[in-house]
Image (spheres, rainbow, N blue to C red):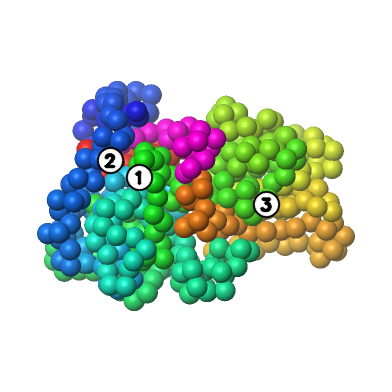
């Protein structure tokens, strides 16, 4: 069982308009069985797909026409999938900070009008030619990272950076560089990082979908599409955190907390969380954070000095989850000489530079690593994470602080911007 929370007050139109605090909001709580909801949605799919296969579908999408403007739910046309593509009916989507980063962005690579959203789960409505990996009715998670399964990177265990369809900020489908979305006037609507899940239907390349166990509640499965996988994978796959080790995490947002969850399940003995908001420590404790450093309250010492003292020479693994080059320097400065690893998970502004002393790099023997999508290969690793969730090892429920209906999508932007939420799940249909 899980909760769907619906707000009683009228729909707010502008995510930039200042809202009442959430504590003043009255929520109406309805309880549904996740299995019943999913079964109903799957039955609807069976009824509808034979009528829609090969044809454009008219449906609702939350379109963003200008940077920073409220999304507007309007009717759009979604073209059928081309060869190698899959059309998916979205069940749940959740909002990630990258959606907000690009929603605010006035210059390229941001491009408008567009359909944001890249954390989701849905049901395959139809497939294009040459697609045999998934078929109508399969439950899938779309991801911004591709797995072609054939290139040197996909074949290697050492990389998750597919070189046939590399990740890029691109307004098109990866294979054809065209859009499948138009508005009712025929104007092209752009895709967002190969997913565009703020639409009842979307088209995704088969290299960007992972078939999952339909028993996983959709309002949990969608979290594995981006943020939680990124944090968890950074600890599990990129850093390969060892049992008994000490971990420092810079930034206790949902990505940092997912790093903590990954480190906890890898058996880390000590997990030091760094943030400027002490409330984050309370969240952090649920995910295994054992110590808290308030970066705004270190007196004359730097955060790295404090952590070096606490850990007796530095943490074995340091994760930068904020997206600031200056924090990467701090993380590197407090990771253990000889074997310490610093992992860059946060996304800084384009063009931000790191400046390290080559003498220090040589003499310290530390490793500096980047982790895109947590080093995970979606098609093989997402099912492992979901199985661990179903096995009650991996915590996902604790990340979902809010659930809304699609028509309230702008409220999700408010909640994430105000820092009141870790993950807000949006249900596309009631
Ligand atoms: Zn590949
Ligand atoms: Zn994301």
Name the one closer to the observer, 163 or 188.
Answer: 163
| Number of residues whose C-alpha sits closer than 10 Å to that of mark 1, classed few (under 14), some (14–19) or many (20 or more) | some
Among the two numbered marks 2 and 1 on one chain, the one whose residue lies closer to the N terminus:
2
The reply to whether the magenta stretch includes residue 401 is yes
**Residue 106 locus on image (x, y percent):** 39, 61
Q: Which residue is mark 3?
A: 239
**Residue 75 locus on image (x, y percent):** 16, 55
Name the one closer to the observer, 328 or 243.
Answer: 243
Name the one closer to the observer, 18 or 400.
Answer: 400
Q: Residue at x 27, y 26 (%)?
A: 30
Among the two numbered marks 1 and 3 on one chain, the one whose residue lies closer to the N terminus:
1
Q: Secondary structure at mark 2?
A: helix
Q: Looking at the image, do the residues carrying marks 2 and 1 touch, with CB atoms under 8 Å apart?
A: yes
The label shown at residue 38 is: 2
The label shown at residue 214 is: 1
Q: Looking at the image, do the residues carrying marks 1 and 3 touch, with CB atoms under 8 Å apart?
A: no
Q: Residue at x 15, y 66 (%)?
A: 55
| Number of residues whose C-alpha sits closer than 10 Å to that of mark 3, classed few (under 14), some (14–19) or many (20 or more) | many
303 lies left or right of 179: right
Q: Secondary structure at mark 1?
A: loop
Q: Secondary structure at mark 3?
A: loop
Question: Magenta stretch?
Answer: 386-406
**Residue 21 locus on image (x, y percent):** 37, 28
Which of the two marks, 1 or 3, is nearer to us in this view? 1
Q: Residue at x 34, y 66 (%)?
A: 132
Question: Image quarter for residue 257?
Answer: top right
Among the two numbered marks 2 and 3 on one chain, the one whose residue lies closer to the N terminus:
2
Q: Residue at x 81, y 41 (%)?
A: 308
Compared with residue 207, is residue 344 higher up or lower down, i.e. above or below?
above
Q: Looking at the image, do the residues carrying marks 2 and 3 touch, with CB atoms under 8 Å apart?
A: no
Compared with residue 113, is residue 296 higher up or lower down, i.e. above or below?
above
**Residue 292 locus on image (x, y percent):** 67, 31
């Amino acid at each position: 069982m899980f909760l769907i929370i619906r707000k009683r007050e009228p729909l707010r139109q502008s995510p930039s308009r200042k809202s009442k605090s959430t504590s003043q909001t009255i929520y109406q709580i309805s309880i549904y069985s996740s299995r019943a909801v999913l079964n109903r949605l799957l039955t609807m799919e069976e009824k509808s797909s034979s009528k829609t296969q090969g044809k454009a579908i008219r449906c609702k999408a939350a379109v963003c026409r200008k940077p920073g403007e409220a999304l507007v739910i309007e009717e759009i046309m979604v073209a059928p999938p081309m060869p190698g593509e899959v059309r998916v009916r979205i069940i749940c989507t959740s909002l990630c900070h990258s959606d907000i980063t690009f929603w605010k962005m006035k210059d390229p690579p941001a491009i408008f009008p567009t359909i944001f959203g890249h954390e989701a789960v849905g049901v395959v409505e139809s497939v294009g030619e040459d697609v045999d990996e998934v078929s109508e009715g399969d439950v899938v998670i779309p991801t911004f990272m591709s797995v072609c399964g054939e290139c040197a990177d996909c074949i290697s265990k050492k990389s998750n950076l597919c070189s046939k369809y590399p990740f890029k900020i691109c307004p098109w489908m990866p294979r054809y560089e065209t859009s499948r979305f138009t508005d009712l006037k025929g104007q092209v609507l752009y895709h967002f990082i190969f997913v565009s899940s703020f639409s009842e239907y979307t088209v995704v390349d088969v290299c960007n979908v992972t078939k999952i166990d339909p028993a996983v509640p959709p309002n949990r499965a969608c979290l594995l599409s981006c943020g939680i996988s990124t944090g968890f994978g950074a600890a599990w796959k990129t850093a390969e955190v060892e049992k008994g080790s000490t971990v420092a995490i810079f930034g206790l947002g949902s990505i940092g907390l997912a790093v903590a969850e990954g480190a906890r399940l890898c058996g880390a003995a000590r997990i030091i969380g760094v943030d400027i908001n002490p409330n984050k420590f309370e969240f952090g404790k649920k995910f295994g954070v054992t110590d808290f450093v308030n970066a705004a309250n270190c007196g004359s010492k730097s955060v790295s000095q404090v952590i070096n003292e606490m850990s007796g020479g530095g943490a074995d693994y340091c994760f930068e989850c904020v997206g600031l080059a200056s924090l990467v320097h701090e993380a590197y400065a407090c990771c253990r000489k000889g074997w310490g690893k610093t992992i860059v998970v946060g996304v800084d502004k384009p063009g931000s530079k790191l400046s390290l002393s080559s003498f220090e790099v040589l003499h310290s023997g530390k490793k500096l690593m980047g982790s895109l999508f947590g080093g995970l290969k979606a098609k093989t690793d997402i099912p492992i994470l979901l199985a661990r969730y179903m096995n009650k090892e991996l915590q996902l429920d604790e990340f979902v602080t809010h659930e809304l209906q699609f028509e309230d999508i702008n409220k999700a932007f408010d909640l994430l911007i105000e820092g009141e939420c870790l993950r807000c799940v949006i249900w596309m249909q009631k």
